[in-house]
């Protein structure tokens, strides 16, 4: 049962915001008031729907004592009682604390782990999987840093993904992705196990994380493409070191100005992610109990090609449609992880 006093507090705050915006008496930042009002509106609508069912049930209970209305009440009560759990569940979801980063674009970083050339090839497969998922959602993917191997694998890739609710949909992808398959380089047909690491960071703006000029060192150097081709004639590549944390970010496009923009963008995202992780650690005494979006060393998923199977180890989800998943069909996985995360938050609210 959701405490009535909590629902009333939300209603009172919503009414205050509504009055403040209409007569201009709220003071402060009008944009901030408008955002809070917009965020609370769907919650208040769910409260009204929930309260309406409660009210209708109480009215039907009273009607049972009236001979003229009792039959109608007996018809209505089962329907209302059946509707109540769904209304309460919808309200609980609406009451969950919002992750301010959910609506943000994201920075996607993929690096090969154990497995040599096969791990690099798998990292490339993961990149294409996310590109296809982004395309299906109407998102825009910009590769801002990529190093490839001679076999066409990926040594490292950083991509910027822009669109609606990108981080909300991709934030559970961070971790170690393991693959089991026969590598193209394997002549004996033996199954190898290798891995790649995925990190999904919410894009940070200046308002999210402020970087002082005195806290960074910017170095330029000469970069070259794969196999020594496309050697730049000027020292255009940029390396930025964040002195307080030791974080190092590089970008090696042909434009030095663009490289500074890219490197600062990635640095802000990594610092913002560090700060979010620090706050999460303070809020949660038991990080292991969460589905988690932070521990990059956690093995989260296995892709078994001989069996056409994908298993997400955090929620014990196994799907036998690996070809579709590698083709970008991730909604079933993302929805299951999101639902599990919401269920854990609801359980934590009740403790």
Image (spheres, rainbow, N blue to C red):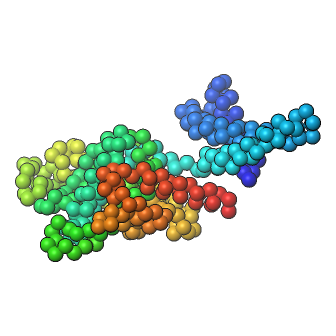
Quarter of the view holding residue 104: top left
Locate residue 72 relative to residue 250 in the image: left or right. Answer: right
Where's residue 157, x and y in %?
25, 55
In this orientation, which residue lies closer to the viewer: 342 or 242?
Answer: 342
Q: Eyeballing the image, is 45 above or below 121?
A: above
Q: Residue at x 79, y 43 (%)?
A: 77
Q: Residue at x 15, y 46 (%)?
A: 254
Q: Residue at x 57, y 68 (%)?
A: 285
Quarter of the view holding residue 161: top left
Locate residue 312 relative to residue 324 in the image: left or right. Answer: right
Does residue 146 appear anywhere in the picture?
Answer: yes
Q: Eyeballing the image, is 92 above or below 176?
A: above
Locate residue 5 relative to residue 194 in the image: left or right. Answer: right
Does residue 197 appear anywhere in the picture?
Answer: no
Q: Eyeballing the image, is 151 above or below 38?
A: below
Where's residue 146, x and y in %?
21, 54
Q: Quadrant of the C terminus?
A: bottom right
Q: Residue at x 31, y 56 (%)?
A: 323
Where's residue 328, x and y in %?
33, 50
Furthest toward the front, the residue is: 71
């Amino acid at each position: 049962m959701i405490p009535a006093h909590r629902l009333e507090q939300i209603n009172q705050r919503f009414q205050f915001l509504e009055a403040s915006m209409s007569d201009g008496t709220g003071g402060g930042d009008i944009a901030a008031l408008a955002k809070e009002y917009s965020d609370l509106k769907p919650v208040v609508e769910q409260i009204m729907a929930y309260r309406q069912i409660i009210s209708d049930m109480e009215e039907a209970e009273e009607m049972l004592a009236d001979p003229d209305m009792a039959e109608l009440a007996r018809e209505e009560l089962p329907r209302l009682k059946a509707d109540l759990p769904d209304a309460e569940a919808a309200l609980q979801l609406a009451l969950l604390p919002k992750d301010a980063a959910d609506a943000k674009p994201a920075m996607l970083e993929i690096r090969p782990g154990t497995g040599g050339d096969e791990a690099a090839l798998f990292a490339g497969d993961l990149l294409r999987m996310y590109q296809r998922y982004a395309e299906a959602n109407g998102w825009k993917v910009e590769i801002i840093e990529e190093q490839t191997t001679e076999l066409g694998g990926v040594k490292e890739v950083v991509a910027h993904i822009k669109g609606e609710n990108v981080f909300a949909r991709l934030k559970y992808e961070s971790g170690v992705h393991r693959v089991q398959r026969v590598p193209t380089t394997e002549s004996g047909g033996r199954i190898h196990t290798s891995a790649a690491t995925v990190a999904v960071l919410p894009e940070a703006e200046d308002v999210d994380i402020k970087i002082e000029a005195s806290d960074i060192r910017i170095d330029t150097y000469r970069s070259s493409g794969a196999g020594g081709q496309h050697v730049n004639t000027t020292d255009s590549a940029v390396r930025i070191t964040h002195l307080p944390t030791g974080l190092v970010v590089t970008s090696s496009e042909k434009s030095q100005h663009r490289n500074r923009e890219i490197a600062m963008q990635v640095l802000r995202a990594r610092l913002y992610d560090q700060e979010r992780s620090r706050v999460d650690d303070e809020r949660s005494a038991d990080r292991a109990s969460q589905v988690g979006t932070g521990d990059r060393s956690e093995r989260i998923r296995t892709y078994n090609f001989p069996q056409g199977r994908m298993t997400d180890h955090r929620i014990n989800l196994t799907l036998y449609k690996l070809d579709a998943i590698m083709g970008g069909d991730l909604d079933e996985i993302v929805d299951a992880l999101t639902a599990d995360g919401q269920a854990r938050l609801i359980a934590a609210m009740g403790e």
